[in-house]
Image (spheres, grey):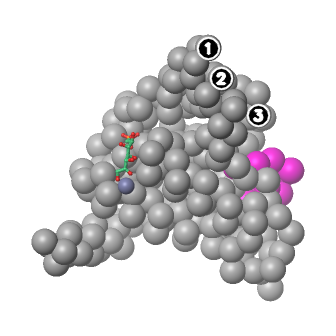
Amino acid sequence: MPHQRIRAAIAVKQRILEDAALLDRLKRATDACVASFRAGGKALFCGNGGSAADAQHLAAELSGRFYLDRPPLFAEAMHVNTSFLTAVANDYGYDHAFSRLTTAMARPGDVLFLLSTSGNSRNVLAAAVAGKKAGCTLVAMTGAGGGELGALVDILINVPSDDTPRIQEGHMLLGHILCEDVERRLFGE
Ligand SMILES: O=C(CO)[C@@H](O)[C@H](O)[C@H](O)[C@H](O)COP(=O)(O)O
Ligand SMILES: [Zn+2]
C-alpha cells in the first residue's frame, strides 16, 4: 500500500517534469506575482480543507520568508480570520466566504490563487468571479481536468492527476517553486 502510493506520487511528479506547457504556465504565474509585488500589489490564496492549509502555507512563504532574509511581501490566505469566515458563512452562506473577502481586499493587478483539486468548489468559483471583477490575475491550481474553474481563470496550473492527495502534493511542489522563483527574482543577488 505505501509503495503503491509513493509510486503514484512519483509518477505525478514525473508527468509534471515532462509537461513543458504546464511549467510555462507556472512561469507566467510567477511573472504575474513579480509584476504585482513590484507595483505594490499582493497575492491572495483560497481553498478548502487540505487546500486551505496549502493556501496559508504558500501565503506564509511570501509574507514571512522563504530561503532569503528579505523584506516581507503582501500575501494572505482568505480563510484565516475565523470570525469573518463563520459570520459570512452563517449570514450569507459558505459559498460567499471567499468572494466577499475578495471583493473587500482585491485590487487591479493583484494575483488571486484559487486552489481546488476538483475545480468545482462553489466558494472558490465565486471568488474567481469576484476576483475577475476586481481586476486580479486569476491563477487556478486544480487537478488534471481543471473543472469549471479552468474556464474562468487566466492561468491554469492543472496537476496531471485525478487523485485529490496526489494533486495537492503537486500543488505544494509547484507552489514552492513559484515562491522560490518570486523571492529570487525580487531579492536575489
Ligand atoms: O485534504 C483533503 C484531501 O486530501 C480534503 O480536506 C479536501 O481538501 C476537502 O475535501 C476539500 O473540500 C476538497 O475541495 P476541492 O479540492 O474539490 O476544492
Ligand atoms: Zn489531505
Q: Does the magenta stretch include residue 44?
A: no
The quadrant of the picture occupied by the N terminus is bottom left
Q: Is mark 1 within 8 Å of ligand 1?
A: no
Residue span colored magenta: 34-43
Q: Is residue 42 magenta?
A: yes
128, above or below 92, in the image: below
Task: Return the x and y of residue 138 as percentages of the image width and height.
Answer: 58, 40
The secondary element bearing badge 2 is classed as helix
Label 2, label 1: how far apart the Cα atoms are: 6 Å
100, above or below 20, in the image: above
State the residue position of label 3: 105
State the residue position of label 1: 91
Task: Return the x and y of residue 62 as percentages of the image width and height.
Answer: 71, 63
At 73% from the left and 52% from the top, the residue drawn is 75
Q: Are marks 2 and 1 in contact (CB under 8 Å)?
A: yes
* Crowding at mark 3 (Cα within 10 Å: few <14, some 14-19, many 20+): some
Give the side of residue 150 with respect to residue 187, left or right.
left
Amino acid on which disc 1 is placed: Asp
Residue 112 showing in the rendered view: no
